[in-house]
Amino acid sequence: MSEYILEMKHITKEFTAVKALDDVNLQVRPGEIMALCGENGAGKSTLMNVLSGTYGYGTYSGDIVYNGETCQFHSLRDSEAKGIVIIHQELALSPYLSIAENVFLGNEQVKMKGVIDWNVTRAKAGELLKQVGLGDENVNTPVIQLGTGKQQLVEIAKALGKKCDLLILDEPTASLNDEESMGLLMLMKELQKQGITQIIISHKLNEISFVADAITVIRDGHTIETMHKDVDYSLDTPESYKKLEDRIIKSMVGRELTNRYPKRHGITIGKEPIFEVKNWNVYHPELTDKKVINNVNLSVRPGEVVGLAGLMGAGRTELAMSIFGRSYGSNISGEVYINGKAVNTHTVAAAIDSKLAYVSEDRKTYGLVLIDSIEFNMTLAAMSKYFSKNGILNRNEEKLKSEEYRKRINVKCNNIEQVVGSLSGGNQQKVVLAKWMLTQPDVLILDEPTRGIDVGAKYEIYEVINELAASGKAVIVISSDMQEIIGTCDRTYVLNEGEICGELSGDEITQENIMGCIMTHNNRKGAAS
C-alpha cells in the first residue's frame, strides 16, 4: 500500500500563455492535515481546482494519484465520487434554502422514482449538524439567517454528507472571528481523529502552525519545500513557533522579512487635527430604537495613522460606514470636520467631495466591479470629477493614471485591461486602494485593509499606508488583528459596544492594554446596569 493517499506529480497549468502552475508536486499522507502556503497568486487554489476537477483532465499536464490509482477528474462529480470534496472560500450555499436542503444540495436523498425523501433528508442533516457542532440548529432554518461561521460549518456538514475522505478547505477562516476560527480548527482536529485527510489553504500562519502536520509552500507556481512536524520543525517553545513562521515567510516571498511592519521615516505629524468627529450617534437601520454608536468623538492629525481597535461587534465598521455617506444606520447625529470646517457627508458623493474616502472590509461586494477591468475600477470613484469634462470622459488620462498607480503600488497583472476578478486577493486590495487614492482624499478610512491576503502583500499595503501618511494624509486603520494595530498605528482608539473606551499612543498600544480597556468598560457597564 502506498505511503500517500494523494500524489500530484509534475502538475502544470496555463492560462492564456501564463503558467499558473509549473511542475508542481504534492504528497499527502493518509489522515494528516496538510497546509498549503504561498502568496496571493502563487497557485494554491489553482492546484486544488485541478485536484477537484474544477479544472478538468486535459486542461493541465501531470498526474493525480489517489489511493494508488491514477485518476482523471473531468468535473467535481468525478472527484466527489472518489471521496474528494473542496470547500471554496466563496461559500456555495443557497441562502434562501433551508440548512437541510443545502446539506444535500446536489446529493439529494431520494426514494422511488426520484422523489426526495424529506424525512430522511432532515434526519440525516440533523446527524451531520451534530457532527460539526451545530446540533442545536433547526434544520429547517434558512441559511441566510446564519452567521458566516455557522455557514462554514454547514458547508463542512455538506461535505461529510458526500462520504468525504479528503477534505479541501480554501481560506476557511478568512471571514471568521477568532472564536469561530478556533472552533473550526478544533473541528478539523476532530475530523482527523475520524480518519479524514485534510488540506487547508490559509494565510494565517498561527492557524497553520496550530493545526497542520505538514506544510507545503508554493511560490510563483513552483513547489518550494514541504516541512513535516517533528521532522523538519518542532513547536515546543514560543521561539520555535517564531522560527517556523520566519521559515514559511522566507519560502513564500523568497527573502527574509525581518520586520513585518515597515519602518516609517521622515514623517512629521501635524499639531492640529485634519479630521474630527464630534458627538457621533447612530441607531440600527431597522431596529431604530437600538443605539449602535454612542457619542463618539475622535480626531486624526496630518501624517498620523490612527487605529480603531476592538472585538468583533464593537461597532468599528458601523462607525466608519455611518460617517462615510451615512452608508449605515438611522437617526444619525453629530458633526464631521475636515481641515477645521464642518463638512457634509450625508451621501457618498458628498463625502468624496469633502475629501473623505472609505476602503470597505468587503472588497468584492462593496469595493470592486469584479467583471470589469483594473482601469475601470481604479478610476470609477474619481471619474466624474477628475476624468471627465462636460460629461465626456478623457480616456487617455484614465489610462495614464491607471498605469501610473499600477506601477506605484505594484499591482501584479498582465495589463490594466485585465478583469479585476481574475486578480489575487492582495492585488484586488491594491486596486481598491488605488481607486480611493485617485479621488485625492485628505482622510482615508481603511477597514480591514489586509484581510485574506498574504504576508508579502500585507507588507506592500503597509508601505502604501506609510506613503499616504508621509504625504500629509490622515489615515484610520480598522483591524481585528491587534498586532497589525500595534505595528502600523501612532495612536489607537479602543471601541467596545459602540463606545470609545480608551485611547492609547505609542508604546501604550499593546494587546494587554487594548484588552484592559475593553474589560474595564465591560465592568463599568455591568456595574451601571
Image (cartoon, rainbow, N blue to C red):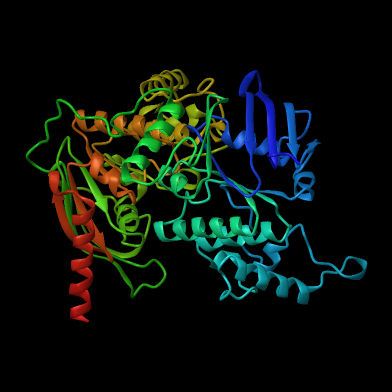
Which residue is at 54% across, 20% downward?
Answer: 414
- Quick check: can you spot residue 278? no
Q: Position of residue 91 (x, y in %)?
A: 59, 52
Q: Is residue 189 above or below residue 233?
A: below
Q: Is residue 231 left or right of residue 484?
A: right
Which residue is at 49% across, 30% downward?
Answer: 376
Picture quarter containing residue 486? top left
Picture quarter containing residue 359? top left
Which residue is at 41% across, 27% downward?
Answer: 250
Q: Is residue 435 above or below residue 30?
A: above
Residue furthest bottom in the image: 529
Q: Position of residue 194 (x, y in %)?
A: 64, 59
Nearer-the-camera pick, 471 or 252: 252
Q: Is residue 411 left or right of residue 347?
A: right
Nearer-the-camera pick, 309 or 165: 165
Picture quarter containing residue 456? top left
- Give the position of the C terminus as an image quadrant: bottom left
Nearer-the-camera pick, 438 or 482: 482
